[in-house]
Image (cartoon, rainbow, N blue to C red):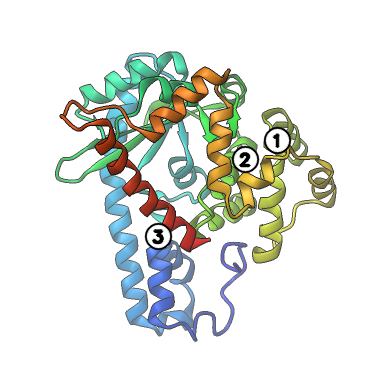
């Protein structure tokens, strides 16, 4: 917490940590960042074994970034040549803008956002570059719910790209695409034209993504680093939160930042967030023990009318055939065996 807030390393910091603590740090992808934050600390340098391991993490992350950069250069070059505007999200934004060194912010994939009207064209460009869909979505469901398509290129160093047509989270919060692109800021990366969300909208996106995935340590460090390194326009943040309908997630994010990270917004911001009256579904999808059920209900409610809702539920109960000779009952049994296993895993984590 102190390091993320920009405080210098304290005397005895991490002196009581065991190998288990460092394994947790490394499993969260924080090894490179810890190395950079502590490598100049004289006291920490006496623990040479740990420092060497973290230095190895940093070097490995730097190599991965160079490989990813080579791939991303090709993608940006292709998109620019076809006049497809593209915005960098999450890790791609954080590494460049917030951490100032992409090696400090490891990521498993690159998140790219394009406009709906360019989405199919962007998919074709990725396929021409050798990428293939990792998961095949129902086209109607993907389009209506604005789900990202995951692409992978399985060469010597596999690379993955999540191609987004919109920003959505928890099956309830959908940032209006026009508002997102009106708020985007044009920039340049390696000589290519790119867009970034504004600082305030990036913070909103990271916040609702954090709540959606129950906030790993990595995600919380990201949020604190944004607050530490970039000056937010708090009035603009509140206006964007209200216009995009995400005031309640921000309220809960700042509650946890205050409790666990000693990070507070200005008093007037806290008062404004507290005064918001949430929809009855919001706290259920954010914090309720049965939040995954409520998120499914939120997703179903987005369909207009009962007929498309029932059709969607039917496809979830019994997935369409894949061309094999499996009967309806066998598809149902196979599908729900995996679902029950997943629900059991999630329940144990609650």
For marks 2 and 3, the one nearer the N-term is 3
Residue that label 2 marks: 204
Q: Quadrant of residue 247?
A: top right
67 left or right of 86 in image: left
Secondary structure of the residue carrying numbered label 2: helix
Residue 185 in percent (x, y) is at: 56, 27
Q: Is residue 106 above or below residue 205?
A: below
Pair 1/3: label in front: 1
The answer to whether residue 170 shows anywhere in this view is: no
Secondary structure of the residue carrying numbered label 3: loop
Q: Quadrant of residue 9?
A: bottom right
For marks 1 and 2, the one nearer the N-term is 2
Between 344 and 141, the residue placed more toward the observer is 344
Residue that label 3 marks: 29
Residue 49 in percent (x, y) is at: 32, 81
Q: Quadrant of residue 197?
A: top right
Residue that label 1 marks: 241
Q: CA distance from mark 1 to mark 2?
A: 7 Å
Q: Residue at x 38, y 72 (%)?
A: 23
| Badge 1 density bin: few <14, some 14–19, many ≥20, Cα 10 Å | many
The answer to whether residue 65 shows anywhere in this view is: yes
Q: Are marks 1 and 2 in contact (CB under 8 Å)?
A: yes
Q: Are marks 1 and 3 in contact (CB under 8 Å)?
A: no
Q: Residue at x 65, y 65 (%)?
A: 260
Q: CA distance from mark 2 to mark 3?
A: 22 Å
Residue 311 in percent (x, y) is at: 45, 23
Q: Residue at x 43, y 52 (%)?
A: 343
185 left or right of 133 in image: right
Secondary structure of the residue carrying numbered label 1: helix
Between 251 and 114, the residue placed more toward the observer is 251
């Amino acid at each position: 917490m102190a390091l993320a807030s920009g405080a210098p390393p304290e005397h005895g910091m991490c002196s009581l940590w065991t190998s288990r603590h460092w394994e947790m740090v490394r499993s969260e992808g924080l090894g490179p960042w810890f190395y950079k934050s502590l490598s100049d600390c004289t006291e920490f340098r006496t623990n040479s074994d740990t420092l060497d391991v973290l230095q190895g993490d940093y070097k490995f992350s730097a190599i991965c970034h160079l490989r990813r950069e080579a791939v991303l250069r090709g993608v940006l070059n292709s998109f620019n040549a076809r006049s497809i505007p593209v915005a960098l999200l999450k890790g791609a934004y954080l590494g460049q803008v917030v951490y100032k060194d992409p090696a400090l912010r490891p990521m498993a994939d690159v998140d790219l956002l394009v406009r709906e009207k360019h989405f199919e064209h962007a998919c074709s460009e990725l396929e021409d570059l050798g990428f293939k869909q990792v998961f095949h979505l129902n086209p109607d469901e993907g389009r209506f719910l604005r789900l990202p398509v995951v692409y992978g290129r399985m060469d010597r160093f596999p690379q993955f790209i999540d191609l987004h047509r919109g920003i959505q989270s928890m099956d309830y919060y959908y940032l209006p695409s026009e508002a997102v692109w009106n708020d985007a800021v044009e920039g340049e990366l390696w000589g290519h034209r790119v867009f970034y969300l504004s600082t305030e909208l990036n913070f909103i996106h990271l916040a609702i993504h954090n709540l959606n995935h129950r906030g790993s340590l990595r995600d919380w460090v990201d949020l604190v680093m944004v607050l530490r390194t970039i000056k937010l326009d708090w009035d603009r943040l509140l206006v964007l939160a209200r216009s995009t309908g995400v005031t309640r997630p921000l309220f809960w994010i700042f509650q946890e930042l205050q409790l666990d990270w000693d990070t507070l917004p200005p008093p007037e911001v806290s008062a404004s967030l507290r005064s918001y009256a949430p929809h009855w579904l919001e706290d259920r999808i954010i914090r309720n023990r049965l939040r995954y059920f409520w998120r499914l209900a939120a997703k179903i409610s987005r369909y207009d009318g009962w007929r498309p809702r029932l059709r969607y539920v039917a496809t979830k109960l019994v997935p369409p055939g894949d061309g094999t000779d499996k009967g309806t009952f066998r598809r149902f049994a196979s599908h729900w065996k995996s679902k029950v296993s997943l629900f059991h895993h999630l329940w144990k984590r609650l």
